Image: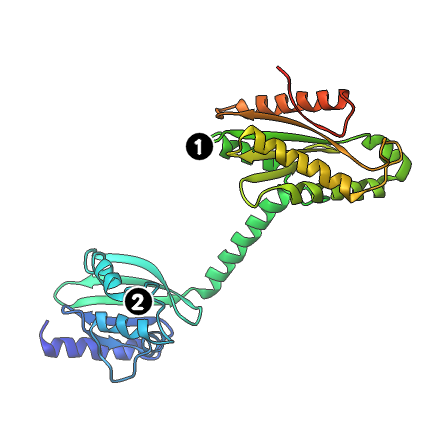
Amino acid sequence: MKADQMQSLVDNMALLFGSSGVVVALFDCQDKLVYANRAFRELTNLAEDEYLYWPDLIRRNYQSPEGLHIETEDVEAWLDSAYDRRWKLPYREFELDLKDGRWIQLAETMIPETGLLAIGIEITSSKTAVSKLRRDYVQAMVTAETDPLTGLGNRRALERLTSLLENAVHQSGVSILIIDIDQFKEFNDQYGHLAGDDCLRQVAKAIQSGLRESGDYALRIGGDEFLVVLHDTPMQVALNIAERIRLRLVESALPHEDMPDGVVTVSVGVARAERLEAGSINALIKKADQALYEAKQAGRNQVLVRSD
């Protein structure tokens, strides 16, 4: 485009978009800014008389505490990557964020023999609404999968965990603990349901305190029954964790007159699988539950592996 034609185009754009809240800019075929309205200059930190090449505009914003947010540790590498997309399509849309927290939806259109026209609108409010919706959804999912009394996962969480475990690689296998409060019905009958709820919370606390920082998942799956999944855990380690949980509850000394030692105790059944396949975790849980039954039959307040 000839210089006088370009100037005529710029004059018309200034007349149309100079005071508009819409972001408008035009870069020539050498990628030099030839027109930018006030909205574009404000968001890119440009003075009225500055007409930079696009790479220099990006470098300016990268160094400035204001303007476009360029998320990179190497702005030159970022520019190389950006040029793989810029000037390659006749039209494209994308989002960009500013250092003050605002968001812009930008559309770039290539105009033959003229340059690249950029038009954008602010979408901060809609981005904020979407972010809040996403946070609310995640929180709803967490709430739906959490036992409100103990704060542990519930059966819905177990369904999700089962799917993840059966599609994961387990170098040291998966171990399962089934934990049941001894004589809990008798505890409720004697001390009342409020005390029973507090007992459940104390057991959940003992379970959580006995677990490792990662790879261990505790859930409440019944009235007084808990399940712990131990990812990549050999049998001896699983037994150590189960025994630690049992002892920590004994040490909490929650009164239970119907028990031999006068305190609340738990029985624990343990099972382990070298690998998991679709549907196999249910069989592993059943095996741990059978070990729990044997622990109850053997006198309670103990940890047992099912004897095959």
How crowded is the residue under tag 1: few (<14 C-alpha within 10 Å), some, or many (20+)? some
Q: Which residue is depicted at the point 83% across and 37% down?
A: 263
Q: Secondary structure at mark 1?
A: loop
Mark 1 or 2 closer to N-term? 2
How crowded is the residue under tag 2: few (<14 C-alpha within 10 Å), some, or many (20+)? some
Quarter of the rendering containing residue 62: bottom left
Q: Which residue is depicted at the point 27% across and 66% down?
A: 75
Q: Position of residue 290 (x, y in %)?
A: 67, 20
Q: Position of residue 250 (x, y in %)?
A: 77, 39
Quote the CA–CA distance across marks 1 and 2. Answer: 48 Å
Nearest the eye: 11 or 34 = 34
Q: Position of residue 15 (x, y in %)?
A: 27, 79
Q: Secondary structure at mark 2?
A: strand
Task: Identify which amino acid the numbered label 2 is placed on.
Answer: Ile
Quarter of the rendering containing residue 242: top right
Q: Which residue is depicted at the point 66% across and 29% down?
A: 178
Instruction: Identify residue for label 1.
Output: 169
- Numbered badge on residue 119: 2
Q: Which residue of the protein is positioned furthest toward the left in this rendering?
A: 2
Task: Identify which amino acid the numbered label 1 is placed on.
Answer: Val
Nearest the eye: 12 or 60 = 60
Report the colour scheme: rainbow
Please tell me whether residue 70 is drawn above or below residue 292 in the rendered image. Answer: below
Q: Nearer the viewer, mark 1 or mark 2?
A: 1
Q: Which residue is depicted at the point 63% across and 27% down?
A: 270
Query: Can you see residue 96?
Result: yes
Query: Is residue 237 left or right of 54 when viewed as pictured?
Result: right
How many dots with numbers?
2
Quarter of the rendering containing residue 221: top right
